Amino acid sequence: MTRAEIAAIWISIGGIITLIFLIVFSEHGFVDYRALKSKETGVLEKLETEKTETRALESEVHSLKTDLEYIKHIAKHEHDMAEPDELIFKQESDAEEGRQ
């Protein structure tokens, strides 16, 4: 083999190594691809969580618009309301917590 052939082989090897380095570490290379795939997975998981929460809220809104029993339940348990023929008894500790 002549010196020119050996030099050409080394230049080719250097070029191949440079290309591999660019493929792996460049701005749009494999490392960025893996990071973006990981980020995409996180965003998709968050999207599913948000969709589930949205469905639950839509269901609650629908119930508040149409279900009288649900409205009564919310009024009693979250707003301490009672129907005209009901009495509400509170313990001393409950009354003290309300004052604080």
Image: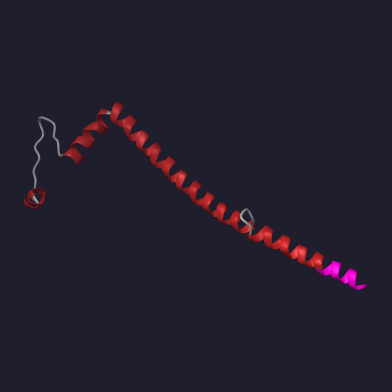
Does residue 12 lie above or below 83 as drawn?
below
Secondary structure mostly seen in magenta is helix
The residue at 79%/67% (across/down) is 13
Q: Position of residue 1 (x, y in %)?
A: 93, 73
Residue 90: x and y in percent read 9, 46
Quarter assignment of residue 78:
top left
Scheme by which the image is coloured: secondary structure
Q: Is residue 7 left or right of residue 75?
A: right
Residue 72's spot in the image, x, y percent? 21, 32
> Where are the magenta residues, as a range?
1-10
Residue in front for this viewpoint, 29 or 68 = 29
Q: Is residue 55 left or right of residue 71?
A: right
Residue 8: say if magenta: yes
Residue 29 lies in the magenta stretch: no
Q: Is residue 96 above or below residue 60?
A: below
Front one among 93 and 52: 52
Q: At 25% from the left edge and 28% from the top edge, which residue is drawn?
A: 68
Residue at 10% across, 40% down: 88
Taking 68 as reference, is 8 above or below it?
A: below
Residue at x-position 7% and y-position 51%:
96
Q: Nearer the viewer, residue 93 or 23?
A: 23
Q: How many marks?
A: 0
Q: Quadrant of residue 67?
A: top left
Q: Residue furthest top?
A: 66
**Farthest residue in the front direction?**
4
In the image, residue 17 lies at what x, y percent?
74, 65
